[in-house]
Amino acid sequence: MTGLGALVKRNTKLYFKDKGMFFTSLITPLILLVLYGTFLSNVYEDTFRSALEAADSSVPDRLIGGCVGGQLVSSLLAVSCVTVAFCSNLLMVQDKVSGARRDLTITPVKGRVLAMSYYLSTLVTTLLICLLATAVCLGYLRYAGWYLTVSDVAFLLLDVVLLVLFGTGLSSCVNYPLSTSGQASAVGTIVSAGYGFLCGAYMPISQFSEGLQKILSFLPGTYGTSLLRNHALRGVFEEMGNQGFPQEVVEAIRDSVDCNLYFFGDKVELKMMYIILTISLVILAGIYVAMTALASLKPPLLVKKEV
């Protein structure tokens, strides 16, 4: 355990010491917040306002701000928890490229301990950055329209922790076989560009075709996004009911922003979303353990340093 703790500390220090990697991970959520607030807030606001005005309901600006802010914040956190994890996990690949991993394997440190240290250090660094991003997002909601309770904030933090665990497991499984900087950059680019669409953060799944909705309903990331949506917007929908908004209008909005997800026509409850996400964490962790166990049976490969 002492060796594992020392390796986790070493990996975490190296990550924060690499200013380029650290600041890239840190500003990614902030950049997304600025981009969402600048380019998508008006689109979301027009969508909410037209949906509510169609029901002949007056729409307070503060309520619209809460709707838009909740959707923007949930989208940002859903993407950041995974993309930041991939960025944090690049140290695993960098150690192969630099030859540091080969040096570490010469020591009495076992391969599985080294692999676990990368996993835990990625978890720690990603969690720190995403919790900081969550604090910034809560500050934004305070400005845009605050309808959260203490319970909502607690569940938001729980959702962030679960999604960070999901991102850590996914990035560990994907990055473990990589051995060059080019491969790591390619994977990072693909994940950054595509994950937001696959999880419904950039565009709600309800706006996709029916066939694509069925395919995406098998991906656990979509349920993580929906959990964030539900807890970020729960107070907003409650306030709509208190102000006499028709229930069918509120449910239509919940459907449109993926607070309500359907698996082949059946509505998925929040409890089931947590179960799906938790099972995916266990499966990803099991795959990573299996990959490291199989790798330990093979003779170590000498990886040439890149010039």
Image: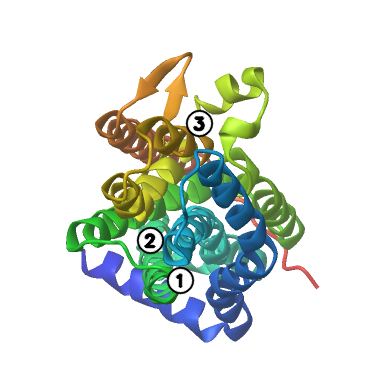
Tell me which residue sits at (37%, 55%) in the image.
Answer: 232
Tell me which residue sits at (48%, 53%) in the image.
Answer: 78
Q: Nearer the viewer, mark 2 or mark 1?
A: 1
Q: Which picture quadrant has residue 41? A: bottom right
Q: Position of residue 259 (x, y in %)?
A: 42, 39
Residue holding disc 1: 144
Residue holding disc 2: 123
Q: Position of residue 57 (x, y in %)?
A: 46, 46
* Crowd band around label 2 with a 10 angstrom C-alpha radius: few (<14), some (14–19), many (20+): many
Q: Which residue type does callout 2 highlight? A: Leu
Q: Is residue 131 visible?
A: yes
Q: Is residue 24 left or right of residue 154?
A: right
Q: Nearer the viewer, residue 117 or 32?
A: 32
Q: Nearer the viewer, residue 253 or 40?
A: 253
Q: Nearer the viewer, mark 3 or mark 1?
A: 1
Q: Nearer the viewer, residue 148 or 133?
A: 148
Q: Are marks 2 and 3 in contact (CB under 8 Å)?
A: no
Q: Nearer the viewer, residue 145 or 293?
A: 145
Q: Quadrant of the C terminus?
A: bottom right
Disc 2/disc 1 C-alpha distance (Å): 30 Å
Q: Which residue type does callout 3 highlight? A: Leu
Q: Which picture quadrant has residue 125? A: bottom left
Q: Earlier in the sequence, mark 3 or mark 1?
A: 1
Q: Position of residue 37 (x, y in %)?
A: 60, 68
Disc 2/disc 3 C-alpha distance (Å): 21 Å
* Crowd band around label 1 with a 10 angstrom C-alpha radius: few (<14), some (14–19), many (20+): some
Residue holding disc 3: 219
Q: Quadrant of the N terminus?
A: bottom left
* Crowd band around label 3 with a 10 angstrom C-alpha radius: few (<14), some (14–19), many (20+): some
Tell me which residue sits at (42%, 60%) in the image.
Answer: 63
Query: In the structure shown, which secondary structural element does the residue marked by tag 1 occupy?
Result: helix
Disc 3/disc 1 C-alpha distance (Å): 31 Å
